[in-house]
Image (cartoon, rainbow, N blue to C red):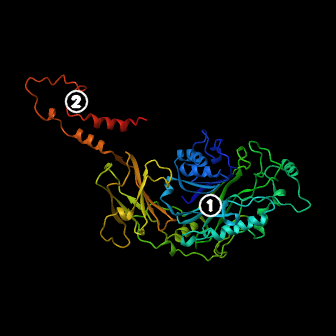
Amino acid sequence: MDTLRFYFVTWNVATKNPSQDLNALLDFPSQFDKNKPLPDFYVIGLQEVKSQPQNMIMDNLFIDPWSSAFNAILCRRNFFMAKNIRLQGMLLLVYTQMKHLTHLREIEAQYTKTGLGGMWGNKGAVSVRFNIYGCSVCLLNCHLTAHEHLLADRINDYNTIIKQHTYHVKETTNILYHDYVFWFGDLNFRTDHPSGSSPTSEEIVAALQKIEKDKYTSLLKHDQLIAVMKADEAFSEFTEPDIQFPPTYKFMTGTDEYDLKRKPSWTDRILNKVIANNYENLTLRADLISYHHIPHYTVSDHKPVVAQYNIKIRRGFTSSILNESPRASRTAIRMRSAAVIPPSADGTTVSLDATDGPLFESDFAAQEAQAFANYTEKTVEFAPISRIWYIGDADFRTQCTLSHDVEINPSDWIGIYDADFHNLDDYIVYEYLAKLSLPHAHSTAGQPRTITLSFPVGSGVRTPGFYRFIYFSQPNNDVRSVLGISEPFEVSSKEDKLVSLDNSEPSPSTSSPAQPGANTNNSDIFTDFTGLDVAKLSRHFANDLNID
C-alpha cells in the first residue's frame, strides 16, 4: 500500500433533514458491482444543518439526523467514525476503515467563528487534523459569507481562518503547515460580471442550456474564487481541479430548476494543497480520481459536490514495529524550508532537482525508504484475554506491550468499548493509565515494555457482553492518538459465574454409591430438582433471553 483514497462530500443541506437515499452520494457499489474497492476515508462536510436552539439541545442528547443517516450506511460497511466536530450548522464527519484506526496519530479538531465579527458561529470553519503513516493531513469544512456583493467579506473570512485556526501539534500549528490540506464547503463565491454587462439570472440559465457538455469556460471566467486565487487575495496556496459540472446553487427545493432569484453560481467547492517537497528524496502528491456534483438530490437549494483523491504515503508501511530496532523520532527527518513549490500549469509537480535526471520506479522506492528511514510509529499491543471478566471481581488484570518510543503521558487512558463499536467517542467507561498500571521493573533502553493493567473493583462495565480495550495517548486535552486496540474479550455476571461453578461440582447423587434397592434407571430429569437454586437459574435465563 503506497496510497490512501479519500472520498469527499460537501453539501449545504439548507436546514433540511435527510429524506433521500444517501447511498449514491457515497458512491457505494451497486448489487452488480460489489467488488468495487471502497475508499480508505470518507470525509463529509455539511453546512446549514438545522441549528435552532431546540435542535442543538436535542442533538446534544441524541445524534443528529444527518450523522445518524451516514452512520447507518457507513458503519454497516465496517467504517468507523474517527472524529467529528460541529459548529452550529457546520458539521464535519471523518470515517475510516478499522485497519487504519491504530495508525491515527495526533488527532485534533478545531473551529473558528467568523459570523458577526467572530462572535457567531453561523459562518466560519471546522476541521480535523491527524497524522497517518508518517504524513500530516488537515481536513477543513467551511461556510463563508453569502451574497454576491460581499466578496471582500469572504476574503476576510479566509484570512481570519488562516490566522486564528491553530492546532496544538508542534510541527503543524497552522493549517498550511500540513503535508496535505483539503479545504471544502460552501465557499459562497459567485459569478461576477463587469458592471454594465452583467447578465440576468434568466440569461445565465439560457446560456447554460446551450453549453456543450462539461464546457463551462465562458461562465467560469467570471467566477469570483478563480479571480481571487489568481490575484493572491485568498486561496492562492490551493489548487482546484477543472470544473466540469454546472453551477450548484441556487435551485428551487424539490426540483432541478434554478431559482432565478439568484444568479447560478459554483458556491460549493473542494480545494487541495500539497507540500510536495516537504521531505528530501520523497515527492508527495494528491492524484484526482473524480470531481463532480450529484444532481438528483433535491432536498436542498444546493447540489452536493463530491471528489475522490489518492494521496501518496510511504510504500510498504508496516503495521507494527514492536520487534524492530530503535529509531530516531520524526523530528530527525530532514525537512525542507518553508518555501512551497506549487504545481506547474499542467498540473504536474516540480521535480526536486533538475540535475538529478529521470527517475524510475525503483529509484522512487529507494528514495522513499531513505526519506522515512528515521520514522517510527508508536504502538501498543494488548495481550490476548482468554479468561472471562466477571462483573464485580476484586481485581481483573491483563497486560499490554508498548513499543520503545511510546512516552507515557499523565493523561493517557484506556477506554472500554463494545466489541462492535463504530465511533472512537463511544467509550462505555475509561480509566487513566496511571490508575491502572502496576509498578514494573525498569526496561532496557530501546526495547519494548510490557506493563500489567489492574482494574480495581468499581471499574469496568456493568453489562455482560463482549468488549475491547483501546489505548489512547493524550499529551493534552486537545490531541490524542490511537496506539492499540485489543481483540474482543468477554464480560459476564457473577450469577453466570456461580451457575458455572455449580455445574462443575459433582452432585451427591453421583459422588456416592447407589443405595441398595434404588432404581437408578428411571430417574426423571424434569422432576429431579435436587440442589437447584431456582432464583439463580431464572436470572441466568433472563440475561440470555433478554426479554423486553
> In the rendered view, does 261 fall on the left or right side of 545?
right
Residue positioned 47% across, 49% down in the render: 421
> In the rendered view, does 75 fall on the left or right side of 217?
left
Under mark 2, the amino acid is: Phe
Q: Is residue 505 above or below residue 273?
A: above
> In the rendered view, does 308 fall on the left or right side of 74?
right
Q: Is residue 404 above or below residue 34?
A: below
Residue named by callout 1: 126
Q: Find the distance from the CA under tag 1 to the CA under tag 2.
A: 65 Å
Check whether the beta carbons of the residues at disc 1 and disc 2 lie within 8 A of each other. no
Point out residue 73 in the picture as x, y percentages from the top left corner: 57, 45
User: In the orientation shown, which residue stands out farthest toward the right?
Assistant: 196
> In the rendered view, does 517 fall on the left or right side of 233?
left
- Secondary structure under tag 2 reads loop
Residue named by callout 2: 529
Q: Quadrant of residue 4?
A: bottom right
Q: Is residue 275 visible?
A: no
Residue positioned 67% across, 66% down in the render: 118
Circle 1 crowding by C-alpha within 10 Å: few under 14, some 14–19, many from 20? many
Under mark 1, the amino acid is: Val
- Secondary structure under tag 1 reads strand
Q: Quadrant of residue 398?
A: bottom left
Point out residue 200 in the picture as x, y percentages from the top left corner: 88, 53
Point out residue 130 in the picture as x, y percentages from the top left corner: 55, 63
Circle 2 crowding by C-alpha within 10 Å: few under 14, some 14–19, many from 20? few
Q: Nearer the viewer, residue 184 or 479?
A: 479
Residue positioned 62% across, 61% down in the render: 126
Residue positioned 37% across, 62% down in the render: 401
Point out residue 513 in the picture as x, y percentages from the top left corner: 10, 32
Image quarter (top left, top right, bottom left or bottom right) of the N terminus: bottom right
